[in-house]
Image (cartoon, rainbow, N blue to C red):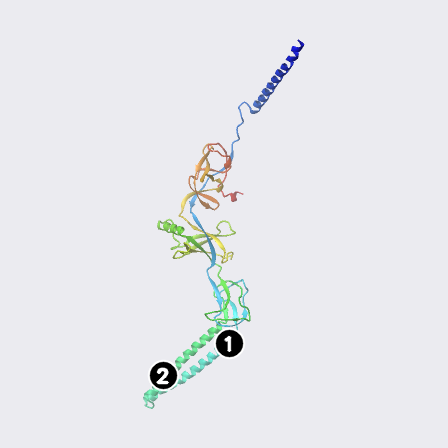
Amino acid sequence: MQRASFYLIPHILTWRNAMAGLLIISCLTSCKRGALGPGGPPQAPTPEVTVAKPIAKRLMDWDEFTGRLTARERVEIHSRVSGYITQVSFKEGTEVKAGDLLFTIDPRPYEAIVERAEAMLAQAKTTAELAGVEAKNATALRQGQAISVEESERRLKSATGELAGVRAAEAALRAAKLDLEFTQIRAPISGRISDARVTEGNLVSGGTQNTTLLTTIVELDPIYCEIEADERSVLKYRQMHKQGERVSAMFERIPAEMSLINEEGWPHKGQVDFVDNQLNPATGTIRARAVFPNADRLMAPGFFAKVRIPGSGEYDGVLIRDSAVGDDQGSSFVWVLDAEDKAVYRPIALGPLLDGLRVVRSGLKADDRVVVLGLMSVRNGGKVKATPTDMLPVAATK
């Protein structure tokens, strides 16, 4: 009996251990059910999103181009007469007005030429007066047959020739005075002047060929921006003009907006005032020009700029935040809430950015509630908790 009891003890201990394990598992299961509650697993919290209604307005597409600023007028200053520079009368890099004195060339040689021309004119007038008296006397003597007809005609022709000599002397005097006037070199236009390429004491060559460049002046206000439009764009604009959707810059001025490389938006307003008459076969583009006011002298010739011009006629459209747009394998969509605040997947057709908002060509109405924040927590048909806001650009909401 003792031996039988010895073998029975391990079996009893094993059974007791099994029962204890079952009891522990039962307790854990009960505790877990108590924590979850009688309704089963807890429900996920309702996603919170921010919604806004699109902005409905009359819209117009814009086409962007890269251009370079140029001066409306640029003048190279050369001397019309040769001589030594005696004075430089401007401060380099400043603005000058039309008529301001820039350079002075030694006038003494030209003053002497004027004096000589004046003397030659006086002499020519005296000679002409004497010839006129002789011609008058010749007429009287001829009537009295005191001189021959040939002598009378000679004296008359001599008087006529002397009068021509007077006119030649007067012309020579005017030319001499002009050369003297040209020793003072003045600004032909108003604008900003460059540096003096020739300083005092240097000899400059004047005239019309191989003349010395003295400086340059560029007009700053208004200022031009030249752009190159591709052939496809030009054809599009002409087709729109033909259909009455948009006026052509070839016949009327159209609005243009410009932005410098360090600027946001399109702060400069101007007009396209010129389109060239032919396409450049080397580049396949046509040259156009826009003019902009530059009263604050912010812009200078040579700057790069972005220019946009109307690329369509006006149409009814809506605007939304660009961040509200999702991408589904290349197709754009937004989340729209229905009357029960359930999210609905809505495909849309996008247009360009306009004033910080994205143009939606189709797929949305002005009274739709579009999810603008919390897109990642939304699922199609899922209920959300919506907080309304205004449809403003992201930068404006900060």
Residue located 48% across and 79% down the image: 116
Label 2: few (<14), some or many (≥20) within 10 Å? some
Residue located 39% across and 84% down the image: 131
Residue located 43% across and 76% down the image: 171
Q: Position of residue 68 (x, y in %)?
A: 47, 56
Q: Position of residue 367 (x, y in %)?
A: 44, 38
Whether residue 222 is visible to the viewer of this picture, yes or no, is no
Q: Quadrant of residue 27?
A: top right
Q: Position of residue 149 (x, y in %)?
A: 32, 87
Residue type at tag 1:
Pro
Residue type at tag 2:
Lys
Q: Residue furthest front?
A: 3
Nearest to N terminus: mark 2 or mark 1? 1
Q: In the rendered image, which residue does mark 2 sit on? A: 157
Q: In the rendered image, which residue does mark 1 sit on? A: 109
Q: Nearer the viewer, residue 177 or 37?
A: 37
| Quadrant placement of the C terminus | top right
Label 2 vs label 1: CA separation?
36 Å
Left or right of residue 284: residue 23: right
Left or right of residue 97: residue 24: right
Residue located 51% across and 36% down the image: 376
Marks 2/1 in contact by CB < 8 Å: the verdict is no
